[in-house]
Amino acid sequence: MLLTEKKLEELLVPKHISKDDFDMVAVEAKKKNVPLDLLLTEKGFIQDSTLGRIIADETGCEFLDIKRTQIVEIDSDLLDYIPEAVAYAQKTVALEQDKDTLKVITSNPDNYTFFKLLEKKSGKKVKVFYVTPFNIDQALKRYKGDLRREVKNLLEELEKNPVKKEQNIVELVSLLMEYAYTNLASDIHIEPLSEIVVVRFRIDGIMHKVAEYSKELHNQVVSRIKIMAKLRTDEKAAAQDGRFEMETAVQKIDVRVSILPITEGENVVMRLLMQRGRWFTISDLGLSESDLKKIRNNAVKPYGMILVVGPTGSGKTTTLYAILQYLNKPEVNIMTIEDPVEYNIEGIHQTQLNPAKDITFPKGLRTIVRQDPDVIMIGEIRDEETVDIAINSAMTGHLVLSTMHTNDSATTFPRLLEMGAEPFLVASSVNVAIAQRLVRSICQDCKEEYYLSETELKYFDSEPELAELLKNIAKVDDLSKVKLYRGRGCKICNDTGYYGRNAIFEVLELTEELRNLIIGKSSSDMIKKKATEQGMTPMIHDGIIKVLEGKTTLSEVIKVTKI
């Protein structure tokens, strides 16, 4: 941390953050051993750029609100001025140069001795700009070259020097982890085929092949991962699950490991759970004002259920954590039972599902309700027993949050009835059902406007309902007049046209009429029709609104809503 806690408090309280909020984050920063300034921005108490300017002013350094394009376009020759190990240690990267001046960015601007040494080495005057820890982390990634090339170099080294085989295997696994983090991958897939092993990253929900290596090395690679995850290296015929922590320059990353024996060997999937950027508030989720109001209103009710529904990988857990963050106050006792606990939240009592220790959802819930909770979060409602306990808890003075696997918000209620819940209990206990999907975001660095081509217009001839919906929301009488957006492809987005993901939502708030439909065991179609008549925005509508706002593409929305 650049400034002491006391100094940051002087600069920020009460102008930018309340004393209570500052103290709460300061305690959490100490427990997690993370920089206080970083945690303040991650939790949304102050914008990254605002804090950057405040710190820069205090240190007498010029602040640079650096753009992603500037980082991507750093000349590789400039990186030679500051070797990678030194750059990481000093939190400094060379950005630009001219005949007389070398411009460097740093999150450690009072490192005067180092800057003097750099002037001597470069023969130029060093101009120092302060950037936030996050931007330095992004700039440091520029030291990484092409993954395929580096894997190839490692394999060539293996052939030349078999004695160093073990060391090179360690380096290979580390390399894959570093590149996954650099490219914002959520998962690493290591897949044995008949003759080679393919490595794929899941980035923004899409799989990308990034490397391959000889099948002969696979056992050693898997063994290395097993050692890191504290799994049995001698067990090759059974599935194994484990975890380990990976440390980067800015944060620790929790890595969940799943190993499954298949016909060609052991298939490995590693999920990277990055703490940074996960501190979403409910305002950050991309909800419309009306939907956000519904969730806030129901989140502060003393009892009832809030259900987040959708398929695997639709962002349900992120939404639940955002609601928990909203509710997380000293006067509120929040307890969870999860499988697994994906992110630790200070002030919330989280329990990991562990069937081997007889900690299941039903048994864990029975114990939790005896712990005097105000709010209970259940990772997932899967069976009749969990449903019964959750509903009873919701009706006896607890606010219950959970997830379910259903296609849309209206389908939630017939699904609960299928699990054995009584209709009047479901109608009485559920406050709101939130359905969601994730769509890729258009890269903002290469976004361009366009109008539908003749080929695209012909597609809508076979989709008249979608065509009419698009015209109505865009308020035009002709599809050719609808202005849309797309990404051309650039260095930032690896020529995909997409960078990051957005969520699209459908928030169904229970009214008296809807409760009567549930009691009468009405179909999901009837429930959805009535909810829409009462003002619910269907998911496809929310998606098209985000398309017209330039946040995502029509193809992405169609893909996840299956129109």
Image (spheres, grey):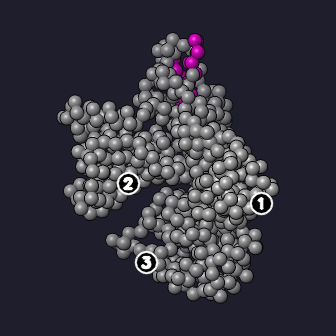
**Which one is closest to the eye, mark 2 or mark 1?**
1
What is the quadrant of residue 175 in the picture? top left
Along the viewing direction, whichever of 298 and 33 lies nearer the viewer: 298
Q: Are marks 1 and 3 in contact (CB under 8 Å)?
A: no
Residue drawn at x 63%, y 74% as measured from the top left: 410
> Height in image: 349 above or below 92?
below
Is residue 377 found left or right of 21 in the rendered image? left
Residue drawn at x 37%, y 41% as measured from the top left: 211
What is the quadrant of residue 149 in the picture? top left
Q: Amino acid at mark 3?
A: Lys
**Which one is closest to the eye, mark 1 or mark 3?**
1
Q: Alpha-carbon distance for marks 2 and 3? A: 30 Å
Q: Which mark is residue 472?
A: 1
Q: Amino acid at mark 2?
A: Val
Asked if one can make out residue 251 in the rendered structure from this viewpoint, the answer is no
Along the viewing direction, whichever of 500 and 131 lies nearer the viewer: 500
> Which residue corresponds to mark 3?
363
Magenta range is 97-116
> Height in image: 347 above or below 483?
below
